[in-house]
Image (cartoon, helix red, strand yellow):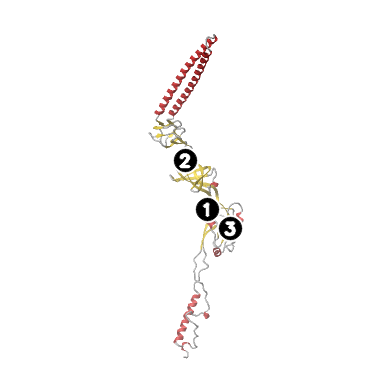
Amino acid sequence: MTRKQTMMWMLASVGLVATAGAGVATRASSSAKPAVTTAEVTRGDLAETVSATGSLEAVTTVNVGTQVSGIVQTLYADFNDVVRKGQTLARLDPSLFQTQVEQAEANLIQAEANVERLKVAQYAATLDLNRQSRLKEKQLVADADFDAAKGALDSAAAQVRSAEASVAQARASLNQAKVNLEHTVITSPIDGIVVSRDVDTGQTVAASMQAPTLFVLAADMTRMHLNASIDESDVGQIEEGQPVTFRVEAYPNEVFTGRVAQVRLQAVVSQNVVTYATVIDVENVELKLKPGMTATVTVEVARSDGALQVPAAALRFKPSAAVLARLGAQGVSGDGQAGTTAAGCAGTRPCATLWLYDGSVIRDVAVRTGITTGAVTEILGDQVSEGVAVVTAIMLPATSSKTVTTATSSSSSRSPLLGASPPPPPPGGAGGPR
C-alpha cells in the first residue's frame, strides 16, 4: 500500500470512531419532571373583613356659646376640666349690660309716673263731666259745654291706656336687659368634660348672626363613636351589630373593639370616590381614646369556625396543557382545561377548580368557595378533605436545545472529512504486493 492510501485509511478510522461516539452522546433529558409546589388543605377559624379608616368623637358633644357680645372678663374652666350642669364656665364684662338695666329701670319708673299723671287728669275730667251733667239736668249749661266735658273724659281715659302700654313696654325692656346681664355669666348646660376652649381672658366675642363658641363639652367620655368611611363596594356587606376591631397610633400594640351602630345613607364624594359614614359604638372605660384620634378599622362581615381552607394561590393556579402532559394529569381535556364536571359546584356560592397532587400525578376537582381573607379561602362541601396536597405553582425544568441523534451502524458511517469511502485494505495487510 502506498503512503497516500495508508493516510486515507487512518483518517477513515478516526471518522468512524467519532461517529460512533456521537451516536452514544448524552441526550437532552426529556424525562425530568417539573418542580411542583403544594400546600395542604387545613382546617381552622376564618373571618372575612372589610378595612377602612375613621376618627373618634364623643357620643354627645355640646358647643357652649354666648348670646351677647362683650369682653371675656374671667374664665373658670380650662381644658380637661370636669364640670357639672349649671357650673359657671366664664363671665363677660357686665358693665354695659348693667347700665342698660339701670336705664330700663328708669324708663319704667318714668312710664309709671306718666300713667299716674294721666290718671289724675282722667279723674279731673270725670269730676268735670259729673258737674256738667248736674247742671244740664237743671238746664243751666249749654249742650256744647256738656259734650266738651264728655270728650275730655274719653281723651283722658285713652291717654291712660296708652301710658299703661308704655309701662308694659318699659317693663319688657327691663326684663330683656336683665336677661342680657344674666347671659354675661356662661354656665355649663350638661355634666361633662371640657374638650375645647376657644377664648382667653380679655378677648372680645361678638354675637351677631350666630353665637360664638367658647367651650366644647363632651357629655360622657366612657362611651365614644367611631365614624368610619366605608367604600361603596363594601358597604353592602356592612350591617348593624357586626363586631369591629381597630387600632390607633397612640397605642399601636393594643386592639380596641366595638360594634356597628349605624350605616348612614348620605354618600360622601371625595376625588370621585364614594364612601358612606358608618357609626361604630366604642367602650372607653379606661379613657385611653381621645376625640379626633384616627383609627384603622376592621369590620368582620362574615365568620366560619372550623372551616376547610386553602391558600388563594391554589385557586388561581391554572396549568398549561404541556405541564399537564408532563405530569400525566387525569380528567383533563386536550386544551389543558379542567375536564371534571361541576358536580361539586351545586349551590349559589362561587365555583373554582383545585389541582390535587399525589406525588406523581395531578388531577383537578371542582369545589365551591366560601368566605375569604385574601390570603386563604374557605372550601365548602366534601370534594376535598383536610391534609390533601393542592398545587399552588409548577416550575418547568431547563431543557437542552441540541438535537438528539441515535447511533447508526458502522458499515454506513463515514468521516465527514472524506469525500468517498476508502478502499478496503488488500489481502496480506500493509505488506501486500506493490
Circle nearer the N terminus (3, 2): 2
At x 58%, y 58%, the residue is 365
Residue type at tag 2: Glu
Label 1, on which residue?
376
Q: Residue furthest top?
A: 138
Tell which of 131 and 71 is nearer to you. Answer: 131
Indicate which disc residue 365 carries: 3
For marks 3 and 2, give the one nearer the viewer.
Answer: 2
Q: Secondary structure at mark 1?
A: strand
Task: Kindly report the distance in space between the C-alpha atoms of the residues bearing marks 1 and 2.
Answer: 35 Å
Disc 3, disc 2: CB below 8 Å?
no
Residue 226: x and y in percent read: 49, 42
Tell which of 74 and 40 is nearer to you. Answer: 74
Label 2, on which residue?
57
Looking at the image, is 277 positioned above or below residue 3? above
Circle nearer the N terminus (1, 3): 3
Residue 338: x and y in percent read: 58, 60
Residue 160: x and y in percent read: 49, 19
Residue 88: x and y in percent read: 42, 31
Residue 110 appears in the rendering: yes
Tell which of 200 and 38 is nearer to you. Answer: 200
Residue type at tag 1: Val
Q: Secondary structure at mark 3?
A: strand
Looking at the image, is 42 positioned above or below residue 129? below
Task: Kindly report the distance in space between the C-alpha atoms of the residues bearing marks 3 and 2.
Answer: 51 Å
Task: Kindly report the distance in space between the C-alpha atoms of the residues bearing marks 1 and 3.
Answer: 18 Å
Residue type at tag 3: Val
